[in-house]
Image (cartoon, coloured by chain):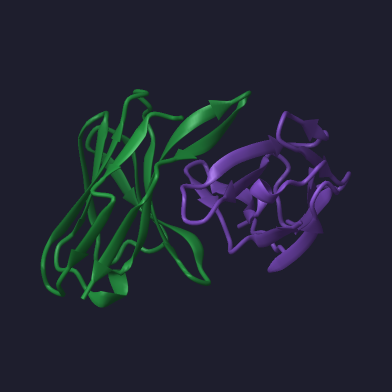
Amino acid sequence: DAGITQSPRHKVTETGTPVTLRCHQTENHRYMYWYRQDPGHGLRLIHYSYGVKDTDKGEVSDGYSVSRSKTEDFLLTLESATSSQTSVYFCAINGLAGVADTQYFGPGTRLTVL
Amino acid sequence: DAKTTQPTSMDCAEGRAANLPCNHSTISGNEYVYWYRQIHSQGPQYIIHGLKNNETNEMASLIITEDRKSSTLILPHATLRDTAVYYCIVRVNSNQFYFGTGTSLTVIP
């Protein structure tokens, strides 16, 4: 257990509404990540953070914004949700496995945009 | 960028060894190979990683070819609980892991 929680775990919303997903970690790790997972695509990186107020884009960042005002929380915001953003969203943190960095994942948030 | 290629699906008899192959022909010399698995929509779970040498832990063994262009994850005695999607991953850069679509392993009673 890497001490990662995500909230909410499930959410149904309507097209055009704003949505914020929260990732919380208790391990004080510097790096945090947001991925989305869709059938046939595996996991794709949306945004990541390498410190408080330090973020960068991933592979599929369009339509998403993030914020990190404190080490333990990384927020993912859909400013105006669309049906194409229906997905399962996973948060991850970087940790050490021996001498190599690896990533540890939260339980996921299932988002449905109607 | 280093990417990975895995078979879409595999079956394995319960109690037998499951050997999951992965090709990563463009891997760089200092890039680790990681294996994760994902059991039915849970978060991906770290299994093992390696650079050049073969590795073993309580979950699995990782065999990396000498040229590092491919690797094999071995689950020595597969159980029904090992049914999952297995991802072979290399790091794209210092901050990004490329997951791909993985191999869906079904362990058959």
Q: Is A36 left or right of B85, judged from the image as shown?
A: left
Seen from the viewer's position, the closer of residues A110 and A81 is A110
According to the rendering, which colour does chain B have?
Answer: purple
Q: Is residue B7 visible?
A: no
**Residue B34, position as x, y percentages in the image:** 65, 43
Q: Position of residue B75 (x, y in %)?
A: 77, 44
Q: Is residue B50 visible?
A: yes
Residue at 86 percent across and 46 percent down: it is B65
Q: Is residue A67 above or below residue A17?
A: above
Residue lying furthest right = B66
Question: On screen, A80 above or below A77?
Answer: below
What's the residue at 83%, 46% (across, down)?
B15
Say left or right for B64 vs A27. right
> Who's the residue at 62% across and 24% down the image?
A99
In which quadrant of the rendered view does residue B62 lie? Answer: top right
Q: Quadrant of residue A16?
A: bottom left
Residue extending farthest to the left is A17
Residue B4 picture location, percent across and down: 67, 59
Number of numbered markers: 0
x and y percentages locating residue B96 in the rendered image: 49, 48
In this view, the residue farthest toward the front is B109
- Which lettered chain is shown in green? A
- Give the residue at x 65% y 62%: B104
Q: Is residue B104 left or right of residue A21?
A: right
Which quadrant of the rendered structure holds the C terminus of chain A?
A: bottom left
